Amino acid sequence: MKQKYDVIVIGAGVVGSAVARELARYKLKIGVLEKNGDVCFEASGRNSAVIHGGFAYDLGTLKAACCVEGCLEFDQLARELDIPFKRTGKVLVGNTEEDYESLKRTIKNGKINGSVGLEMIDEKRLKELVPAVIGKFAMFSPLSGIVDPFQYTIALAENAAMNGVDFYFNNEVIDIHREANGTYHIKTIQNNFNTRWVVNCAGLGSVKISEMLGIHGYRFGGTKGDYIVLDKRVGPLLPMPVYPVPSTTYMGIHVTPTMDGNVTVGPNADYVEDFAYYGVPQRNMDYLAEDASTLWPHIHKSDYISNYSGIQPKWLEGNDAIKDFVIEARDEAPNTINLVGIESPGLTSAVPIARRAVRLLADAERLHPNKDFNPIRKGILRFSEQSDEEKARLIAKNPDYGEIICRCETVTKAEILQAVHNPLGVDTMMSIKYRTRSMMGRCQGGYCQMRIAEIIQEELDLNANEVLYGRSGSNMFTGKVRG
């Protein structure tokens, strides 16, 4: 039996989830199809987690317009969605005359784009902002900031779901065809759907979906970036992101504080054709550390606690030039909105991109406002961030707050249980990790991982071999060690 919708969004990353939330402002039946088991298993959760100021993008591009718009409105968005966000500021550090002239051009470009507060600062001011940095001068962007990309993507999706959007995980699209009545039949590995409109937000799979919709000619590449995660011990030495002077196509290897006090180092930028491999070779980590240490000399192997990588989709032309965001409605594919090449600054730009996509739909048919739409979403309260008095009150009300499951990040059983019973109905170990920060501390789950797996198993009535770490096939257990 087909599930019938007014709009199907393909892809539940940060942009797809933002599009779903924007569509929920109108009286529409909306479904979201996601091939993975949660919303941020690919590019949306594998990036530098920076809210960019919009100064680095070519004049007149969607990247520039959406980035500036997204940056300026992010305080309000963070309040609505109850997500961690901080306007730390950001510096682009230089040493040579060539660097100085490049940064002057960046400031000029940024001001035309609409970036706010950009200024050139000398070494004294640079040292006041980031005492541990190495550099002669810098461009300072005061409105740049950092965000938790997992919490942000999850919050957009949860708020959409609260407002009536249906999410279907582990539903990779394998076929789309337009029926005689003008609607679209979408077949996934699990289900069949019928919809009047399709919005392609498939990220790394967007060209594949474009082809299924009858939109041909896009050529795609991927840029894989590796990162090192450093212990919180060095967090106080980095109050804001520190970048080198950017090239015309690459922002360079940088060091970035996280919302939780760690530091990330990276990324490099290797062109890849395999969009499923996320391994980080040792030689790449060595290169990241060596390069970034010329900016910030506090990168030591004793502080490495993890690594990760992300892959960005790159829309390429014949000369391999990287192009702008694509947000389009094409005559050859009626009733579709096609998004291609949504790479950095996609995290910053997600909601502005979503508004533009929905506007294209509204240009084609009249949309009726949903008066019951509620933009407010509350996240899981973090026990570790509460005062001693509030902690005591929480424990008295719910004893599960008194049981610590993750020691490194002080995550309680009450938080784990809220994450297990999340509004999206996802149940992997990574889903719990991204919602609570459990398994993200110094021991990387050495203490808490098995306890969390046991809670998932008990709460959801699963067999042990049904508990997944993340993607399909990542079973935590395959059988008993002892009979």
Image: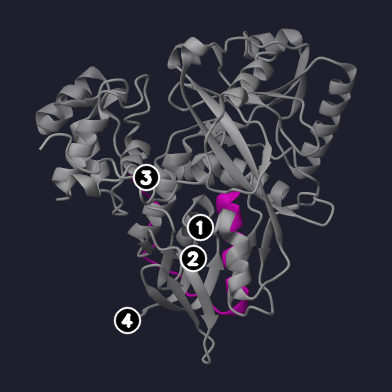
Residue bearing the label numbered 2: 9
Upstream in sequence: badge 3 or badge 4: 4
For label 2, the SS is strand
Q: Is residue 311 above or below residue 105?
A: below
For marks 4 and 2 on the same chain, the one whose residue lies earlier in the sequence: 4
The disc, 2 or 3, on the residue closer to the chain's N-terminal end is: 2
- Whether residue 244 appears in this view of the structure is yes
Q: Which residue is mark 1?
A: 16
* C-alpha distance separating marks 2 and 3: 22 Å
* 10 Å crowding of disc 2: few (<14), some (14-19), many (20+): many
Residue drawn at the location 38% of the way across and 64% of the way down: 165
Which is in the foreground here, disc 1 or disc 3? 3
Mark 4 or 2: in front is: 4
* Residue at the image position 81 percent from the left and 27 percent from the top: 103
For marks 1 and 4, give the one nearer the viewer.
4
Q: Which mark is residue 470?
A: 3
- Which element carries disc 4, helix, strand or loop? loop
Q: Amino acid at mark 4?
A: Met
Mark 2 → mark 1, Cα distance in angstroms: 7 Å
> Magenta part of the protein: which range?
349-378
- Residue 356 part of the magenta segment: yes
What amino acid type should be assigned to the residue bearing mark 1? Gly
> Up-down: is 138 above or below 54?
above
* Residue for badge 4: 1
Asked if labels 4 and 3 touch by Cβ distance under 8 angstroms, the answer is: no
